[in-house]
Image (spheres, grey):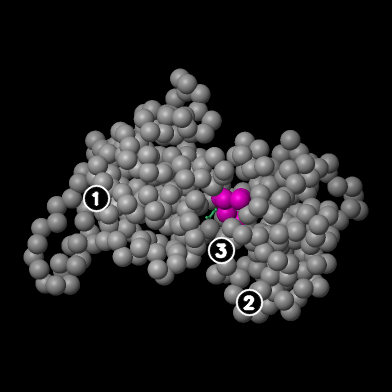
Amino acid sequence: MAVRKPPSRNERVSVCLGFPAYHGPQHLQRLRAVDPRIEPVPLPVDPGGGWVAVPPADPHEEPPSWAVGVAEERRRALKQAEALITLHTPQDLMTLAPRLRWIQGLGAGVEQFARAGVSRERVVVTNASGVSAGSMAEFVFGRLLQIWKRFREAEAHQRAHEYVQTYGRTFAGSTIGIVGMGSIGSAVAERARAFRLHVLGLKRSHRPGATSELAEQLFGPEQLLEMLAQCDIVVVAAPATNATRHLIDATALAAMRPGAVLVNVARGSLVDEPALIQALESGHLAAAVLDVFEQEPLPKESPLWDLANVYISAHSSVSTDRYLDDVFDLFLDNLARYVAGEPLRNRVDMVALGFA
Ligand code: GLV
């Protein structure tokens, strides 16, 4: 379904650039090249305002702390915006941007827009799903190789000049279960097949009897425990919604095979952290790879930091060498569709995801 009718000959289409890395002259030029009616409007920030380090999940006050000196320019930019590409969102976006019809999110996750009460009737949300999937899947296997091949221990022995064997585990013939077979889960599955792992996949929209080229068996959400019981590795790659909150709880962890590894590259809210800590301390799980946490940044006092079998990274499983360029290409393609009155790519079905 198209978002709008194509604009008339002299109509302006105001496109607000809410992500500062896209304010360069080359970006503005490429936007104008899509259609002469497009009017790119950068949403300014204060020099050295520190927006990069702010997690986007919680909508912010307007102006945000990183743009107090340019509040008026921001207000004007949002007021005329018809399309917006952004990572962070103001809490009262719907009031500040009365003409808004389309948001292109910078990431795969869109929960910040749901939290800001973005109107499903008025605004279409598209995400960057797929752009990060390949590099995230590489990250997952980097960690899994580190754990199953015991690289951390080999390095410690090297530092201590100790010639000690560190034999590992074999991927071929073992089983990986992927919770969420979207673009990230599918990219993990593809690579898992190259390692000759048995691949099981859990899909929100699974219908009995449905098959997949990427997984030997598919499961629906109500079959989570059945799938987990067969897994040596579980990768969580589903969106944060009400339905997925604490999906991996004490019961789910107990269902996993003793010695299994849990990987979470999705959102911290999907895993019950205290239950996970218990499963790691008891030795039921061999290890956890955590790129996301219930609270980010992970508080200094979290017990997770000091568990020897936890592998922490700071919400950075994506590789950014090409990410921003690839998202901008996706945005330009979608913008061309928008002005042509065609359906957009990566439209997020906020209702199906369970966002109210
Ligand atoms: C990052 O976490 C994203 O949603 O892409």
The quadrant where residue 146 appears: bottom left
Name the foreground residue: 349 vs 18: 349
Residue 108: say if magenta: yes
For the residues labelled 3 and 2, the Cα–Cα distance comes to: 14 Å
- Tell me the element at label 2: loop
Q: Amino acid at mark 1?
A: Gly
For the residues labelled 1 and 3, the Cα–Cα distance comes to: 32 Å
Name the foreground residue: 294 vs 86: 294
Q: Position of residue 143 (x, y in %)?
A: 32, 55
Name the foreground residue: 116 vs 2: 116
State the residue position of label 2. Answer: 49
Q: Mark 1 or mark 3: which is in front? A: 1
- Of the two numbered discs 1 and 3 on the same chain, state the one appearing first in sequence: 3
Ligand 1 lies in quarter: bottom right
Few, some or many residues within 10 Å of mark 1 (<14, 14–19, 20+): some
Asked if residue 310 lies left or right of residue 329, the reply is left
State the extent of the magenta-drawn residues as a range: 106-111
In the image, farthest residue toward the left: 163
State the residue position of label 1. Answer: 283
Tags 1 and 3 touching, CB below 8 Å: no
Q: Mark 3 or mark 2: which is in front? A: 3
- Tell me the element at label 1: loop
Q: Is residue 234 visible?
A: no
The residue depicted at 83 percent of the width and 67 percent of the height is 76
- Of the two numbered discs 1 and 2 on the same chain, state the one appearing first in sequence: 2
Residue 99: say if magenta: no
The residue depicted at 61 percent of the width and 71 percent of the height is 51
